[in-house]
Image (cartoon, helix red, strand yellow):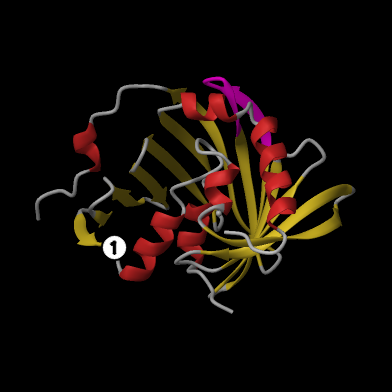
Amino acid sequence: MKKLNLFMSLILILMMGTAASAQTVDDVISKATAAVGGQSAIDGVKSLRLTMTGTFMGGESGMEILIVKPNSKMIKMTINGMEIISATNGTDYWMNRNGQVVDMPVAAKNQFGASFYQYSGFGIAGLIGNGTFTYSGKEDVDGISADVVKGTITGSGDVSMYFDAAGLPFRILMPTEEGDLDMYITDYREVGGMKIAYKFESTANGSPMMLMEITEVEANVDIDPSVFAKPAQ
């Protein structure tokens, strides 16, 4: 079983191919797409700017996420005073840790690239389409009869995704190098014509790991393409 790095797994969530049971998985995709507003609403969101605040491993944390379709993304995360930037313009994949700019390691690049299609802007079809998934049936989760899709993200690792009665994804379970990461995605609100989750709460091996909530979000805003370019070293 291939396992993801825990930090990159959190990025993968923040904010995933099918074979014999393709029709059943396609049904889940169609329902999820409709639940967030439909494909036209998803396609209508060309860019996103999100600000999030909360806690990470007991300390205060903040995030800013910038997305410009089709292939530019930046995540700035502050953890206990340390700033970590992960970004791509579709060609270069780089990281900046407290002022030190480096190319992303291959494993991190694969995971960051695989996470590009995410719930907050690209729809479930892109997520599931970036791997090999099957429908595994219904499972009761906290009183919710959830549709469960399980599989492997290309370039990353194993994932189980849970969808509520309306079709909205509300839970992601991932095995990581540091233990199982269990994240709940809730508080969906409309942004730019589509619904996105505002609250992300995760545990690692049953212990609290992260709680992040969106405090500001803008859709279809102008974002300078140069911010995604790798800084000169």
Q: Is residue 221 left or right of residue 190?
A: left
Pick the front one: 6 or 128: 128
Q: Residue at x 75, y 52 (%)?
A: 24
Figure label count = 1
Measured as percent of width and height from the top left, residue 219 is found at 45, 23
Measured as percent of width and height from the top left, residue 103 is found at 23, 62
Q: Residue at x 78, y 35 (%)?
A: 166
Q: Residue at x 64, y 63 (%)?
A: 19
Q: Is residue 41 above or below residue 150?
A: above
Q: Is residue 82 above or below residue 150?
A: above
Magenta-drawn segment: 186-196
Q: Quadrant of residue 227?
A: top left
Q: Which residue is mark 1?
A: 104
Residue that protrudes farthest toward the left in the picture: 233
Does the magenta run of residues contain 92? no
Q: Is residue 140 left or right of residue 227?
A: right
